[in-house]
Image (spheres, rainbow, N blue to C red):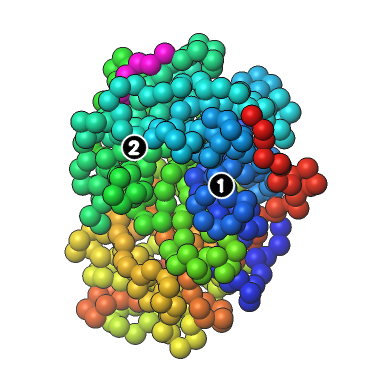
Amino acid sequence: MSTAPFDPLDPHRPVAHLRPPRNWINDPNGLAFHDGYYHVCYQYNPHGTRHENMHWGHFRSPDLLSWEPLPLALAPTAGGEDADGCFSGNAVSDGDRLIAFYSALRQDRWYQPVTTATSRDGGRTFRPRGGLVIPEPPDGCTMYRDPYVWRDGARWRMLVGAALADGRGAALLYESPDLETWTYRGPFCAGTSQPVGSDDRDTGEGWECPQYLPAASGHGALIYSAWDDHDGPSCSVALTGHETGDVFEPGAPVLLDHGPDCYAPALMRAPGSRWLLWGWSWEARDEDWAAQDGWAGTLTLPREISLADDGSLHQLPASELLALRGDHSVHAEGRTTGADPVELGEVGRSFDLTARLDTSGEAGLRLVTAADGSEYLDIRLDPATGHLVVDRDRASRDGRARGGSHRMPCPADRPVDLRVVVDHSIAEIFLTSTGQVLTLRFYPTGADLWRLQARSAPGAGLGYAVDAWELLSLVVKAPSGDAALPERRSA
């Protein structure tokens, strides 16, 4: 591993977040631990920076730090069931087989039936099934896509995302003894759209990319991505609850990620009874800018996710990522009052930060990205409303970048512990005590080192203890010759 360099040609490309060298990516797919490797696939357009020509790109890693690009896992079959795209799904490890379940797109049908492809060589090549596992949706659906398969004892279960004609979003349940023959069990969970979070978002008319995190005694968490026909994808939602028969009975919905730029999270069952999660962080800039740079989208950091005894979900960066901490560039403790900022130190464009903040009134940290102070990202606590606020209104002087402030609930009666990972154009802010996270993209234009400041509003005070480390790059091997784009398959 080497320290993430400043690239004057592309200062926004992440170095510690997984993505291919160029082109469009979106949903993480095919997450599985198989034959000693973490396998991460993703929706990929090998021909450009727009959402089209969907294939599955593929990486694998023994340790979440060094990654090997493998040949494309899935490519559309000319004249076949997936002729217009291999869309989202997941993968399971079964003996010597790695089996991908995915949505088969053809423009002449409104739904995306489920099909499979199997690898018996550790994921280097996949052989398509040549037919459909589930050829059509049950009656009463108006959207149908994105299978998720998991082992439950001696049986296999599958969820498929759906919208129902009665206005409810749903995750539909199937069951199989052998991964071949599937029986429909009905809606696992369904619900009408309702508000969620604090930024005028809702739980969606359709539920994309459903995932299920099982816990003890029939408890679990259903994770899905909220979608509607008019506005498209919106946010990632979590429902915690318990199973009764083939039905999941949820509590109130919550945001899985409180930021504006995380969607389609996907789960992996990892060794040691651990569950990992990756999401897709889309671009918060104009398409022409992404096309000019030659890439769009990145995966989030891998996160360890767990269901606490009180029914809340906790997310933190995977513990392996501590190895990406390089030089300890900032160590600062103190207290400030009033409007004069306190300079804490300089950081590069990628860093990993921990902070304990104790506030009386509105106060927090500022990441200053331009020498004259005109460009910055604010992370502040607002005890009056009980929120942590991340404000990117002045995070880029380029008008093609989105602004806005975003918030997540935050304890107002005690010090707050944060973990903040910033990687060029993506920030993931974790409340370590509550396990909540907020992800957003931002695009600084300044070319200098960034500065960290502690700031408090007039009449407020801030106690702080801040440490920051330079963030090292992932090791991504150069593609081998057989990782090149395969020819379009014939039916």
Q: Main structural element of the magenta stretch: helix, strand or loop?
A: strand
Instruction: State the image coordinates of residue 24 (x, y, percent, origin top left).
Output: 55, 54
Counting residues from the start of the chain, the first of labels 1 and 2 encountered is 1
Mark 1: which secondary structure? loop
Q: Could you tell me the amino acid type at mark 1? A: Asn
- Whether 200 is drawn above or below 107: the answer is below
Cα separation, mark 1 vs mark 2, equals 23 Å
Instruction: State the image coordinates of residue 331 (x, y, percent, origin top left).
Output: 52, 70
The quarter of the picture where residue 99 lies is top right
Q: Number of marks in the image?
A: 2
Instruction: State the image coordinates of residue 444 (x, y, percent, origin top left).
Output: 48, 75
Residue that carries the numbered disc 1 in the rendered image: 53
- Whether 462 is drawn above or below 217: the answer is below
Residue that appears at 62% across and 39% down? 75
Is residue 185 within the magenta segment? Answer: yes
Residue that carries the numbered disc 2 in the rendered image: 207
- Whether 66 is drawn above or below 271: the answer is below
Which residue lies most toward the right here? Answer: 481
Q: Is residue 38 visible?
A: no
Q: Quadrant of the N terminus?
A: bottom right
Mark 2: which secondary structure? strand
| Magenta-highlighted residues | 183-189
377 horizontally vs 240: left or right:
right
Q: Could you tell me the amino acid type at mark 2? A: Trp
Instruction: State the image coordinates of residue 195 (x, y, percent, origin top left).
Output: 21, 47
